[in-house]
Amino acid sequence: MAYLLTGDHGLAEDLVQEALVKVAARWRKVSREGDPEPYVRKVMINQLRTWRRPRRLAFFPTADLPESSPSADESAQAELKVALLRALSVLGAKQRIVLYLRFYEDLSESAVAAQLGCSIGTVKRHTHDALKRLRQVAPRLLEAEVRS
């Protein structure tokens, strides 16, 4: 979840660590209420929304390339993944959170609104604006979706 929200492994680790520190301080209460996962998820989302320092990546580092060349299909999928990560990096934290909850967690608009403590209209607006921005910065993603 943290990686999908931040788009960076290092930032994801920071987000999880900060969230778990906050959860640990209230662990007795959290553990008595049953499943702690929704509480941790909420803490992570709130933590991401309140981060003050800049969190955008200026580059996308890659590991050393393997000796064998990938197939055309693998190359195309890798290119789409990189394009998606770059496109998501231009979105604000709230837009990434809404997209994550709506499309990865498959929550309804009302469930996302309840999770974020906002109105359904706000969720709709963030979803609309984020998808519009993604279409502008990465039209190749839309073309790939049509082909599959």
Image (cartoon, rainbow, N blue to C red):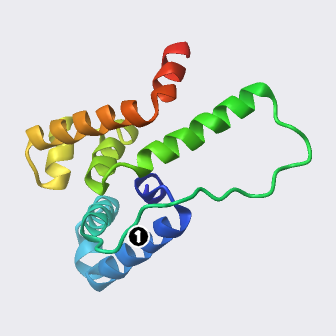
Quadrant the N terminus occupies? bottom left
Q: Residue 42: which quarter of the image?
A: bottom left
Q: Is residue 88 above or below residue 71?
A: below
Residue in the picture at 49% in, 15% down = 146
Q: Is residue 125 above or below residue 139?
A: below
Residue in the picture at 30% in, 53% down = 92
Residue under pointer 1:
15
Quick one: 105 or 33, which is closer to the camera? 105
Q: Amino acid at mark 1?
A: Leu
Residue in the picture at 82% in, 51% down = 65
Q: Secondary structure at mark 1?
A: helix
The x and y percentages for residue 32 are 25, 72
The x and y percentages for residue 77 are 65, 32
Horizontal side of residue 70 vs 146, given as left or right: right
Q: Is residue 73 above or below residue 7?
A: above
Quadrant the C terminus occupies? top right
Residue in the picture at 91% in, 41% down = 68
